[in-house]
């Protein structure tokens, strides 16, 4: 059996381990937790409780201080079972996908949780188990800000990829004006500049060279319009989003630090990854750029 198939049909813990980086995080898991619930989109499922089996793995951040055998310093297993019980009690849902996403979001609300794998299976719908498995990370959860009423509301930015032609276009300022006029946070991304990128012959070194080439182009864009502040870290991006500042993303830090980050360094692919990471409302593609398939955010080509 191939490794991909083995991971697909193995426990979520195997998938978490397989996708971990060079410095893997600690993990806690819940295995074969079975509950009964009224769930399902088909009429024959309504009003009839059926068994659901949950398998969950959560990657957690390292505890900065000594544990001192104190349960308050860890992510408790109870948090996982409580997330399941709370979502099942909140309302009836039709889809396992909906339930899995809500359970994952509730678990990621814990400060220790960084990434969660959730598998849910129906045990009474046939001779086998029918199920779904999802992966969600803290990075993919939208940034929340306090509204006038004091409640935290999600903040969805607009990510805009500017081709080299768009950067050099005489209407650059007007394009940026249009982006800002909407009132949403704006994050600009770029690709590599025109010209050959130096070749090192070593994959890790080449990866950094290609990312740095994109960052050079980010500074070219910043030089064309003073509103374009170049930022590199998630903290800088979040601050800019809260204050509705327009920024240009320098990708090296986020990409190299990501456990499950993008493996290619095409500018559009990186823009799409950032848009999905930030839960953007859309990704605008300015210039003659091919839109990638399979995006989880709306793609909006904007011709020159």
Image (cartoon, rainbow, N blue to C red):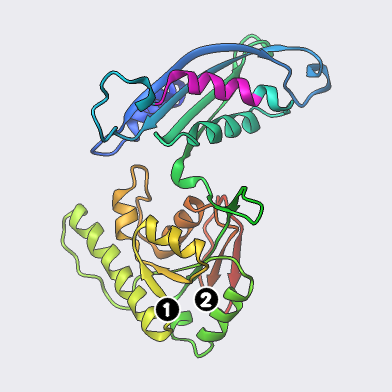
Q: Secondary structure at mark 2?
A: loop
Counting from the top left corner in percent of width and height, residue 74 is at 36, 26
Graded by Cα atoms within 10 Å as few (under 14), some (14 to 19) or many (20 or more), the crowding at tag 2 reads some
Q: Secondary structure at mark 1?
A: helix
Counting from the top left corner in percent of width and height, residue 291 is at 54, 62
Contact, mark 1 vs mark 2 (Cβ under 8 Å): yes
Whether 186 is drawn above or below 71: the answer is below
Residue located at (29% from left, 78% from top): 195
| Sooner in the amino-acid sequence: mark 1 or mark 2 | 1
Residue located at (48% from left, 35% from top): 108
Counting from the top left corner in percent of width and height, residue 247 is at 44, 70
Query: Which residue ends up furthest to the bottom in the rendered image?
Result: 170
In the rendered view, does 65 fall on the left or right side of 264?
left
Whether 230 is drawn above or below 299: the answer is below
- Residue at numbered disc 2: 287
Graded by Cα atoms within 10 Å as few (under 14), some (14 to 19) or many (20 or more), the crowding at tag 1 reads some
Whether 260 is drawn above or below 129: the answer is below
Counting from the top left corner in percent of width and height, residue 197 is at 25, 70
In the rendered view, does 172 fall on the left or right side of 102?
left
- Residue at numbered disc 1: 164
- Tell how many labels: 2
- Compare residues 108 and 95 and report the one nearer the observer: 108
Residue 9 visible somewhere in the drawing: yes
Residue 2 visible somewhere in the drawing: no
Residue range (magenta): 75-87
Query: Which residue ends up furthest to the right in the rendered image?
Result: 43
Indicate yes or no whether the magenta region holds residue 33.
no
Main secondary structure type of the part rendered in magenta: helix
**Residue 198 in which image quadrant:** bottom left
Indicate yes or no whether the magenta region holds residue 78.
yes
Q: Quadrant of the N terminus?
A: top left
């Amino acid at each position: 059996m191939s490794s991909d198939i083995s991971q697909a049909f193995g426990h979520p813990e195997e998938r978490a381990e397989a996708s971990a980086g060079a410095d893997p995080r600690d993990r806690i898991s819940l295995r074969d937790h079975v509950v009964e619930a009224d769930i399902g989109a088909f009429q024959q499922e309504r009003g009839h409780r059926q068994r659901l089996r949950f398998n969950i793995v959560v990657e957690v951040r390292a505890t900065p201080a000594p544990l001192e055998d104190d349960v308050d310093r860890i992510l408790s297993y109870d948090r996982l079972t409580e997330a399941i019980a709370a979502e099942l009690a909140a309302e009836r849902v039709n889809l396992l996908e909906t339930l899995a996403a809500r359970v994952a979001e509730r678990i990621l609300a814990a400060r220790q949780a960084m990434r969660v794998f959730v598998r849910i299976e129906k045990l009474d719908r046939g001779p086998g188990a029918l199920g779904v498995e999802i992966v969600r990370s803290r990075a993919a959860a939208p940034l929340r800000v306090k509204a006038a009423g004091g409640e935290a509301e999600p903040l969805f930015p607009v990510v805009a990829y500017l081709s080299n032609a768009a950067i050099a276009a005489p209407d650059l300022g007007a394009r940026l004006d249009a982006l800002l006029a909407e009132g949403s946070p704006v994050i600009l991304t770029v690709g590599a500049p025109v010209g050959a990128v130096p070749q090192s012959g070593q994959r890790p070194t080449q990866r950094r060279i290609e990312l740095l080439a994109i960052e050079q182009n980010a500074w070219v864009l910043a030089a064309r319009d003073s509103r374009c502040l170049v930022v590199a870290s998630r903290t800088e991006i979040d601050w800019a989003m809260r204050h509705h500042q327009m920024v240009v993303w320098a990708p090296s830090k986020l990409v190299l630090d990501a456990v499950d980050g993008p493996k290619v360094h095409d500018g559009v692919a990186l823009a799409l990854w950032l848009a999905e990471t930030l839960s953007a409302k859309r990704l605008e593609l300015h210039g003659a750029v091919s839109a990638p398939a399979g995006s989880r955010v709306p793609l909006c080509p904007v011709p020159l």
